[in-house]
Amino acid sequence: NFGDTNGVFCNDEARVYLATPFGTIAAGNIINPLRAIYDSSTVDPYYGNQRTYYMTSDYRGNALRYGHAIGDLSIDLQLNVNSGNRDKTAPRDGNVFTGLVTYDFSGTVVGLGFGTGNSQAGTPYPRTGPGLTYGGTTAGFVRTSIGPVGVGISAFNGKVKLDTDTGAPTSTARDMTDLRLKLSYPTGQWNFIGIVGVEKEKGDFTGAAPWGAPVYTFVESGITSPRINITRTDLDLWAQYDIGNGVKAYGRFNTISKKYSTPDNGAASAKGTASTLEAGVQVSF
């Protein structure tokens, strides 16, 4: 359970499994099934931003997993043991139990996910800092089509709590919610893709200073606060042209806007926007 500098096996999995008529049981290093909330709502080659998942709920490592499909119903349940225990010299004990249930209504797929547990945070997955514990996850997605347009909608909420050892008066350090709409319109050799996302984060590190919790500073006003609200809005537009033989030319426009504020002082705020215009060729082989 000792990974490389980029996390436990990065995005790779190593597991053994036993398939039975009553489901499949797997053991090994397995990625959290909650990430499939984003992957399953994909209606094009682009999953959109998974930031909320990675920041709050991407526990991986030694795990047991059970999966079963009954007709159009699919169930995946996973127990991560010693979750986040990335460094042998500084183990972070605890368990995380997650699940994802999906059902295919004749082409319209609906999924619901959950997560609970008591694992300490602080390793790169999720990137939340020491003195924190997993606070739970609720999530869901819908994937369907309206005529020729593919539609995917995902909602994800993850929480990270302050460790009780800090003696902090607040319980939730980070509360992040992500809503995402994905559209895809293929016509001939063209495929037009649009992804719109809104992510809201409430950070509250009140009373957590004993372990060096962040205190946010608004540069223009000089106001500091242990609490912050962040809204991130992003728009990602793609136009792909299939040349053939696994080669696609594309143009892309992406813009992300962020707004920062704090409930402690209405005079503190900040905004920022970044945009990218990109063109290139994608090759699959």
Image: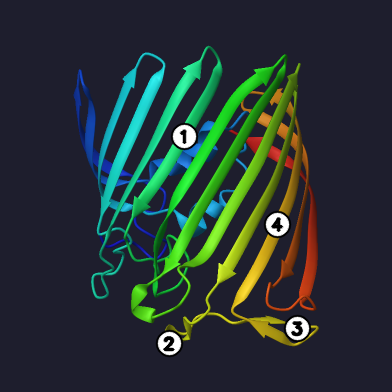
The answer, for residue 285, to whether it is visible in the render is no
Instruction: Give x and y (percent) for residue 80.
Output: 28, 50
Residue 282 sits in quarter:
top right
- Disc 3 marks which residue? 219
| Nearest-to-viewer mark from 3 and 1 | 1
Instruction: Give x and y (percent) for residue 66.
Output: 26, 34
Q: Earlier in the sequence, mark 2 or mark 3?
A: 2
Which residue is at 80% across, 61% downward?
Answer: 273
Which residue is at 56% across, 49% downward?
Answer: 50
- Give the numbered dot on residue 112: 1
Q: Earlier in the sequence, mark 2 or mark 4?
A: 2
The quarter in which the N terminus is drawn is bottom left
Q: Residues within 10 Å of mark 4 (few under 14, many from 20)?
A: some
- Say which of 156 and 164 sits in front: 164
Q: Secondary structure at mark 1?
A: strand
Query: Which amino acid, by three-letter code, is at mark 2?
Result: Pro
Query: Which amino acid, by three-letter code, is at mark 1?
Result: Leu
Q: CA distance from mark 3 to mark 1?
A: 41 Å
- Disc 2 marks which residue? 210
Q: CA distance from mark 3 to mark 4?
A: 19 Å
Instruction: Give x and y (percent) for residue 7.
Output: 39, 60
- Disc 4 marks which residue? 232
